[in-house]
Amino acid sequence: MPLSIGTLAPDLSGTDARGHQVRLADFRGRRHVAVVFFPFAFAGLCANELEALEALWPSLDALGASVVGVSCDSPFTQARWAEERGLPFPLLSDFWPHGAIARAFGVFNEVLGCANRATFVVDTRGVIAAYLAAPDLGTPRAMAQLEEALATLEVAEGRTDPPGGSRR
C-alpha cells in the first residue's frame, strides 16, 4: 500500500549515477522533491516517461522542485542510462537491498521484483503532498499531473501566482 498524503516521507538515501550521495532530507526547507519510481531502465515506456520528465524539467525547476528517479536496476545500469540521456536530475539505484526504497514508499511490486510506476511529491517539510500513479506497469503516468501538483503546492504556500490570477 503506497504511503498516504500527509505522512512524513521516509528519508530515502542512495548513490546517483555520478557517485554522489542523495538524501531526501538534504532537500528539506529548500525544495520540493518529486520522487519518481520506474520499473526498469532502458524499457521503452520508462524511457518515454524520462523524456517527458526532461521536457518538464525547466518548469518543475521554476516551481522550486527537484526530481529524483528511482528504480531497482543496478548502479551500473542507472549510471549508463543517466549518461546516455544526459539527465538534469539524479537516478538512484534501489538494487541492494533489493527494492528497499520502493518498499519504504509502499510501491514495490513483489511479483515482478520492481517498483510500480508511481510518483510522490514531497514538500519542503518532508511531507507527502501528492501521489500520482499509473494503474499498471504498462500504462504511462500523465506527467502533466506532476506539474499541476507542484503548481498547486506553490500556490498553497503563497509563492507563485495562480493561473490567471495575481500573487497573494
Image: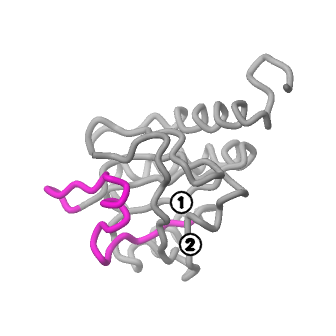
At x 63% / y 61%, what residue is drawn?
A: 88
Disc tally is: 2
Label 2 with label 1: CB-CB less than 8 Å: yes
Is 60 placed above or below 111 here?
A: above
At x 53% / y 60%, what residue is drawn?
A: 68
Instruction: Kindly indicate the quadrant of the structure image that contains residue 93.
Output: bottom left
Give the farthest residue toward the bottom: 19
Which residue is at the front of the view, 60 or 25? Answer: 25
Residue position marked by numbered label 1 in the rendering: 68
**Which percent across, then down, holds residue 6?**
49, 41
**Amino acid type assigned to the residue bearing label 2 in the image:** Val
Is 92 placed above or below 38 here?
A: below
Secondary structure beneath dot 1 equals strand
Secondary structure beneath dot 2 equals strand
Q: Which mark is residue 133?
A: none
At x 70% / y 47%, what residue is drawn?
A: 58
| Location of the C terminus (image quadrant) | top right
Is 164 placed above or below 137 here?
A: above
Q: How is the image coloured?
A: one colour
Label located before the other in sequence (2 or 1):
2
**Which percent across, then down, holds residue 48?**
44, 47
Is residue 168 shown left or right of residue 66? right
Magenta stretch bounds: 90-113
Is residue 128 shown left or right of residue 89? left
**Which percent across, then down, holds residue 129?**
54, 41
Q: Which mark is residue 22?
A: 2
**Amino acid type assigned to the residue bearing label 1 in the image:** Val
On whether residue 117 falls in the magenta region, the answer is no
